[in-house]
Amino acid sequence: MTSDTTPNPPQRRGDLLVSVCFVSDRPGDISLEALRQSEQMLKAQFRYWEILIIIEATDTTAYDRLFAHVENIRLLRVRARLSSYRARVLAAMEAIGDVVLITTPDDAGAVDLFGMILSAHEQASIIVARRQTASFIDPVLRAIGKTGGFRVSTRNLQTIAFPRPLLSVLLNHPDREIALRFPPRDVAIPVLFEDVRAPINGRGIRHFGKRLQLLQKLSVAIAPRVLNSIALISGLVILSGLIFAIYAISVWLVLEDVQPGWLTISLMLSFTAIFLGLSVFGISIGLQKVINMLSPHRDDGIIDEQSSVDLFSEVMTELNIENTASDAPLNSSKTP
């Protein structure tokens, strides 16, 4: 008798639906080879999967041939000159997977897509691929991003894996375009990083424009905190104007040799400061009210709970019921 020693092929996971999204702002950048490699990986490891491709609507026929070579692909044509941040949002909204991985053609060959997908699912965390070195502008971006509440760094690649629950939270974020690229600094949103060997691809006018676009978006994202600071400074200006007005009147009442016109000029300066302070303060709090009204009200403030409450511990005693079903053996024999 001979035994078959041929190893069994690995079982594909059938409990997980995976969506891999390719986003690129360069026409024709998504190659067939990159898609075929992703297809082979997904087909070998998962039973249910899909590949989403985000391209501009002007690329009418450049990707039509992919349907004959790659399985389970969805081609989404978007408006021309759409920013990569907005394209990532559209990809996340259209993906149907339990785990959604958003990547670019440049990153796909340098990261372990399968490992990031499994880590995101098993650890229920967002997995961000990052390089080992950072750009010289990294400290500035990190400082601005921290002010806005985001994990901004030039080390972060554009490949991120999201579990479905956390992806839904980010899609409801007021600044979801930034949140899907740089996860928020929130204890309710766990983020893990996977270091990869990838060079800094930050040269050229295109990448310089992306940096400026990121600075613009971060500046908008920190608007509420800037308005709070402006309101506080305006309040200090109002208080200073009042103190100076009181000081000017006190000097005029106490001293006899006050220069003619000094009191009038001092009062005009103090009243001008008070008026400007009140104006800026009113505009600041008004804009904050508008932002609060337009921002979605999130009800996910509670992230964990510990309790010792047992409301039904005495139900069995009060009803005079003895639980003996678990102790009695089951008689499964049948009489013919």
Image (cartoon, grey):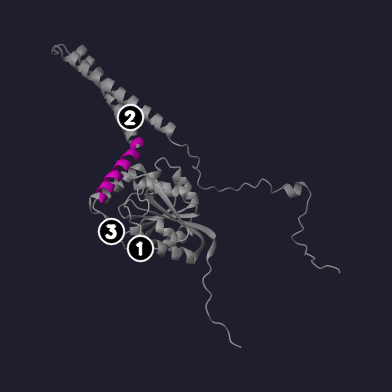
What residue sits right under mark 3 in the picture?
133
Q: Secondary structure at mark 3?
A: loop
The boundaries of the magenta stretch are 206-224
Q: Main secondary structure of the magenta part?
A: helix
Q: Earlier in the sequence, mark 1 or mark 2?
A: 1
Front one among 174 and 146: 174
Q: Relative to residue 230, is residue 93 drawn left or right? A: right
Which residue is disc 2 drawn over?
A: 231
Picture quadrant of residue 73? bottom left
Work out whether residue 163 or residue 39 is closer to the camera in this orientation and state it: 39
Q: Which mark is residue 109?
A: 1
How far from the left and from the top, in percent, is residue 306?
55, 48
**Sooner in the amino-acid sequence: mark 3 or mark 1:** 1
Which residue is located at x 27 percent, y 22 percent?
Answer: 276
| Mark 1 crowdedness (10 Å alpha carbons): few <14, some 14-19, many ≥20 | few
Camera-side residue: 138 or 322?
138
| Residue drawn at x 33%, y 49% as measured from the top left | 152
